[in-house]
Every structure is written in structure tokens, then in C-alpha cells.
Image (cartoon, rainbow, N blue to C red):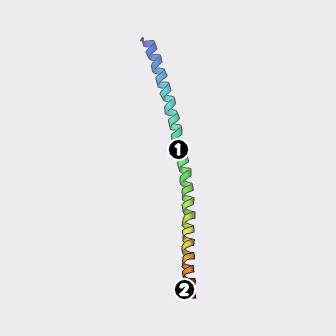
Amino acid sequence: MDSGWALLLSAVVTGAFGVVVTLLQKFKKENASDHEVVMGMLKMVYKKQSNVEDKIDRVDSKLDTHIQNHK
């Protein structure tokens, strides 16, 4: 293989890997933003769930008090 073909082959390989690295970086950035969105949604669900648990605890204590009043 002469130096011309070697130079052409190295340019093609370098270009191909450059495209692959660019695509991987783009997917990495999208993954990070998707992760951020999902974490925000999970925080909302956790807040709603903790509020529900607080309400259940309050209803439970009110029910206990009500049952004690009937005894």
C-alpha cells in the first residue's frame, strides 16, 4: 500500500470514528435530559404519595378516636 492510500484510509477511519463519537455524545446528552425529567416526575409522585400517607395516618387516628368514643 502506498502512502496515498494509507492517508486516504486513515482519513476515512478518522472521519467514521468522529461521526460515531458525535452520535454517542448526542445520545448521552439526551439521556441526561431524559433522566432529569424522570427525576422531576418521581419527586412529584413521591410528594403526592407522602401526602396520601399523611392523610391515611390522620384518617386512621380519627377512626381510632371515633371507635374509642363508641366503646
Q: Residue drawn 49% across and 29% down?
A: 18
State the residue position of label 1.
31
Q: Which label number is shown at residue 68?
A: 2
Q: Marks 1 and 2: which is nearer the front?
A: 2
- Viewer-proximal residue among 47 and 62: 62
Query: What secondary structure is marked by label 1?
Result: helix
Q: For marks 1 and 2, give the CA distance.
A: 54 Å
- Viewer-proximal residue among 56 and 40: 56
Residue 44 in percent (x, y) is at 57, 59
Q: Residue drawn 54% across and 50% down?
A: 36
Residue 19 in percent (x, y) is at 52, 29
Which quarter of the figure has residue 51? bottom right
Residue 25 in percent (x, y) is at 50, 37
Marks 1 and 2 in Cβ contact (< 8 Å): no
Q: Earlier in the sequence, mark 1 or mark 2?
A: 1
Q: Quadrant of the C terminus?
A: bottom right
Within 10 Å of disc 2 (Cα), the crowding (few <14, some 14-19, many 20+) is few
Query: What secondary structure is marked by label 2?
Result: helix
Within 10 Å of disc 1 (Cα), the crowding (few <14, some 14-19, many 20+) is few
5 lies above or below 27: above
Q: Residue drawn 55% across and 76% down?
A: 60
44 lies above or below 63: above
- Viewer-proximal residue among 59 and 32: 59
Q: Amino acid at mark 2?
A: Gln
Q: Residue drawn 57% across and 55% down?
A: 41
Q: Which label number is shown at residue 17?
A: none
Q: Amino acid at mark 1?
A: Asn
Furthest residue to the top?
Answer: 2
